Image (cartoon, grey):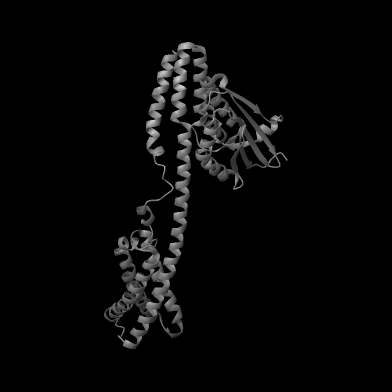
Amino acid sequence: MLLKWLSDLRTFFADLMRSLMPSIANTHLDTPTEKQKTQHKLFIPTFESRSSVAFWLFLIVFFGLYGLAVRADAIFNANQAFTLFVAYILTNACVVLFNVGYIHITADTLQKLSFQEILKRCVLVTLITAPFATLVANFLQLVLLDIPFVWVDVFKYMVFNTVASMMIFGLLIFYFANQQKKIEQQYTEYQQALLEQNEQLKARITPHFFFNMLNTAQYLIETDPYEAEAMIRHVSSLYRMSFGEVKEIALLDEIAICKHYLNVEKYRFEDKLQVAWHLPDDEDMLYDMTIVSLSLQLVLEKMIIFVVEMTTETIYMDITVNWSNDLVTIDIQVTLPKIHYATIRENITKKLSFTNQINVLKQHYGESSVIDYFYDGKYLLIKIQYPLKDVAV
């Protein structure tokens, strides 16, 4: 029975690791590619969707009504108002069609330019297309509405439409560029969150721990089947609790995860690892305390890798939890062996990092959350601190 459980456990984790490996292998998700950076640089509506077309139609009609309101004192009847309104609509439609049409056609080219180059090119194009669009609009007014073609008036409209077009397009480009910056910021934050999630996934199925656990289970099955069964129960509980969303959980649940993890490791290290928990005497306080899932467990795992596995001496680990003045403090004190002290200290100095765990804590509890470590010739102390308001007060 135990051999079958062990075989099934190997198969389950092998399939799980294969399914997650593409996500875990991508450790550069916080750096967008060049294609992603330029994909939506030109954030301005053209004619690519119904909503964009509706936006420009609204502007055409709006400025048509605005022009009609400005000339209200010179309008004497409904026919004159209708003719003037249609004339404004034709002019505005030609200006929008020529200018926005250019942006729509050359969007792929504009995406490759900087924001300043995009703005400069749009200004230059407007200086050409706005006067030409005014000429076309006045020609259509002559043909369709029988409005005389007066060069002095046409020249005035050319200047007015050119200046107005430059102002409108400039404001739109600045506005949508600001929107694009917000999108890029959200994208960066999303990528960072995804990177941290991948780090959490890697930590939950660390191959180092997993294969050590399998080897220990295989040994126990041959020497002590009852202990092997107990170990498998610990492993099952550990992974059942840890494979879930990274979120705020009760500290008691996090401690339960840590105890399952340490119990599994104790089968491998036996008396070499001695763990003592020092928790608040007030049970109500413990029930109110929370922490981000796996924050403490990942710290303990690093202590196993950086200290316990590096020596043959007995390692004592004391875990102390305190909550006062709306500040949670978790101290993990680990004895350092004398024989391998220099090697362990060098590895800790070069490789020990809690960056991902700190970032997750800050997301949930604020910028004052920290994880830091200190060591001398005898102890290594890891201190986890984060603000947590006591709701019972």
Q: Looking at the picture, tell me which residue is in the foreground, 105 or 321.
A: 321
The spot of residue 261 in percent (x, y) is 53, 26
Q: In the picture shown, does residue 121 fall above or below 301?
A: below
Please, which residue is most extreme toward the left here? Answer: 143
Judged left or right of residue 282, residue 88 is: left
The spot of residue 199 in percent (x, y) is 47, 38
Judged left or right of residue 323, residue 187 is: left
The spot of residue 303 in percent (x, y) is 55, 31
Looking at the image, can residue 293 be seen? no
Judged left or right of residue 392, residue 335 is: left
Q: Looking at the picture, tell me which residue is in the foreground, 162 or 11.
A: 11
Q: Residue at x 39, y 74 (%)?
A: 165
Q: Looking at the picture, tell me which residue is in the foreground, 16 or 335.
A: 335
Q: Residue at x 47, y 27 (%)?
A: 209
The spot of residue 32 in percent (x, y) is 40, 51
Please, which residue is most extreme toward the right here? Answer: 393
